[in-house]
Amino acid sequence: EMDEEWEGAGEGNQQKRSFPAALPTPQRPAKVQTLVLASKLEGDAVGDVKKLIGEYVQQGMNHGKKTFFKQGTDDEEVSDPPVWLYYWDGRDGFESSGWWLGPTIGGREVHGWAAQHSSIPASRGWRIPHKALVRHDV
């Protein structure tokens, strides 16, 4: 879009000058929230816990709360599958609600569960696997 302005001195001696309209204000990139799931055992974490440790990046929403995704790797020596961290509300019963870790959002296969109903993922109270006792090292 161009704005126009007349310039020049005297009648009949005016010229039309065009110049670009104001450019739109650049938008700041949206802040992407990142969470890290860690174990107090660090490198000594085993099995189910080890594959869940890592950085989770916010990607979308589920049941009114942010979802987070941990990208897996294709390394043949290390089993590091992709994992979702998401909230499930009480629509399937209170015992199914809380924060979950699994390969898909709302899928039958899950890796962990925290029976908390906070606006952000639970920082404590994780059960890995989901029917185990609460772990105090995650």
Image: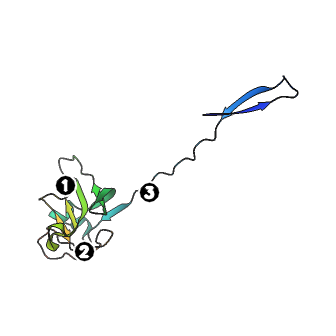
Report helix, strand or loop for mark 2.
loop
**Residue 134 vs residue 115, the one in the foreground:** 115
Q: Position of residue 1 (x, y in %)?
A: 60, 34
Instruction: Say whether disc 2 or disc 1 marks the residue closer to the N-terminus.
Output: 1
Q: Position of residue 19 (x, y in %)?
A: 68, 33
Q: Position of residue 56 (x, y in %)?
A: 31, 59
> Is 7 above or below relative to 116?
above
Cα separation, mark 3 vs mark 1, equals 24 Å
Instruction: Say whether disc 3 or disc 1 marks the residue closer to the N-terminus.
Output: 3
Which dot marks residue 96?
none
Q: Which residue is mark 3?
A: 31
Q: Residue at image x 22%, y 67%?
A: 89
Q: Position of residue 94 (x, y in %)?
A: 16, 73
Q: Residue at image x 52%, y 49%?
A: 27
Tell me, yes or no, whether the two marked residues, 2 and 1, touch with CB atoms within 8 Å. no
Amino acid type, mark 1: Thr
Report helix, strand or loop for mark 1.
loop
Q: Which residue is mark 2?
A: 116
Amino acid type, mark 3: Lys
Q: Which residue is mark 1?
A: 104
Q: Is residue 16 left or right of residue 138?
A: right
Q: In the picture, residue 135 is in which quadrant? A: bottom left
Of the 4 image quadrants, the one containing the C terminus is bottom left
**Residue 111 vs residue 23, the one in the foreground:** 23
